[in-house]
Amino acid sequence: MTEPHLGGSYDQQLRFARWAEDEGLVSFARCDHYLSGRDPTPESTDAFAVLAGLARDTSDIRLAVLVSPITFRLPAVIAKNATTIDQMSGGRFDLGVGTGWMELEHQRLGIPFPDWPERWERFEEALDYLDEAFGDGHGKHDGEHYFLNADVKPKPTGLRLIIGGSGEQRTPTLAGKRADEYNFFICPPEEAKAKIGVMRKAADGREVEPTVMGGALVGRTRSEFEERLASAAAERNITPQEMEDRYADNGHPVGTPDRVAETVAALEDAGVERIYVQWLDLSDFEGMAETLDIVRGG
C-alpha cells in the first residue's frame, strides 16, 4: 500500500498508482493537504481531483483519501466528491475523514479552523450527514452546523468509510461504531494494540479493519541504510542516530530487511491488518519501489 504525502504532479502520482496496481498492492492512498510546514513548500494537488483521475487511469487497485479534514469541505461536497469517484472507479473508492489538525495550512490559505471541541462536534455531525446522504431514499439531517433534506444521488456502490486520527479513546471508539476501517499514525506495537482494543470493544462484533500509516527508512544492506539515514537526518538538521532512534521509537519500519520484518510482525501481532507506507519524495520512484518491496518482505 502506498500513500504520497501532499501529492506532487498528477503524472507522478499516476506512475506510483500504476506501479502499485501492477505489484498487486491493495490500495493507493493520498493525504488531503494543501500545504505543509516544509520549506520550500512542495507541489500540492487536490486529493479528490487526483483520485477522480486515477479512477479512470487505473483498473483494479482501491483508491483512498487518507484522510480528508471536515474543515476543507461541507459534508454535501464531501458526499458528492465521494459518490462521483465511487462511480468513476466502479466502486473502488475509500473515503477517509477526520477532524483536521494542520492549523498552519488553514491560516496561510484563509480556511477557517475552529477550535478542537467544535471541530470534533462538526466531525461527528458530518458523519451523521453522510449516513443520510449515502443511505437509501430521502436523507434528512437538521443539526447545529449542517442541514440536509434531499434524496442525494448517485448512491455509492462500493464505498468504504475510513475514520482516521491518533486519539486513544474518542477516535477508535467512533471508528468502531461507524467505520469500515480505522486508521491511525504508526506507533509502537503496544500503543497500537491498545487503540485497536478500544476500537474492537466499541465495534461489538462489527468488522472494522485496523490500519496504520507512516514512513519507512530502510535499505537492503547496512551501508545502503546508513546512506539513506544520513541524508534524511541532514534534511532535518539532526544526527543519524537521532533520526534512527526517532523512527524506531515511533514504531516505523527502519533498518535492514530482517529488522523491518520484525517491526512489521510486531504490528501484525498487535492487530494491524494493513500498513500504508508514506512516501514524501515523488521524484525518487526507485527509492519508493525498493522501500515498499522491503516492507512487504520481498
Image: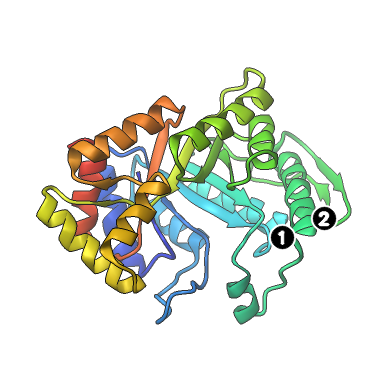
The secondary structure type at the circle numbered 2 is: loop
In the image, residue 9 above or below residue 222: below
The residue shown at (72%, 33%) is 136
User: Where is mark 2, residue-wise?
Assistant: 146
Q: Quadrant of the C terminus?
A: top left
* Between 149 and 69, the one nearer to me in the picture: 69
Q: Is residue 206 left or right of residue 122?
A: left
The residue shown at (33%, 35%) is 264
The secondary structure type at the circle numbered 1 is: loop
In the image, residue 155 above or below residue 286: above
In the image, residue 267 above or below residue 75: above
Q: Sequence-wise, which precedes: disc 1 or disc 2?
A: 1
User: Where is mark 1, residue-wise?
Assistant: 74
Examine the image and state in which quarter residue 181 appears: top right
Whether residue 240 is visible here, answered yes or no, is yes
Residue 223, given in percent of the width and then of the height, sits at 10, 55
Residue 154, given in percent of the width and then of the height, sits at 63, 45
* Alpha carbon distance from label 1 to label 2: 8 Å
- 10 Å crowding of disc 2: few (<14), some (14-19), many (20+): some
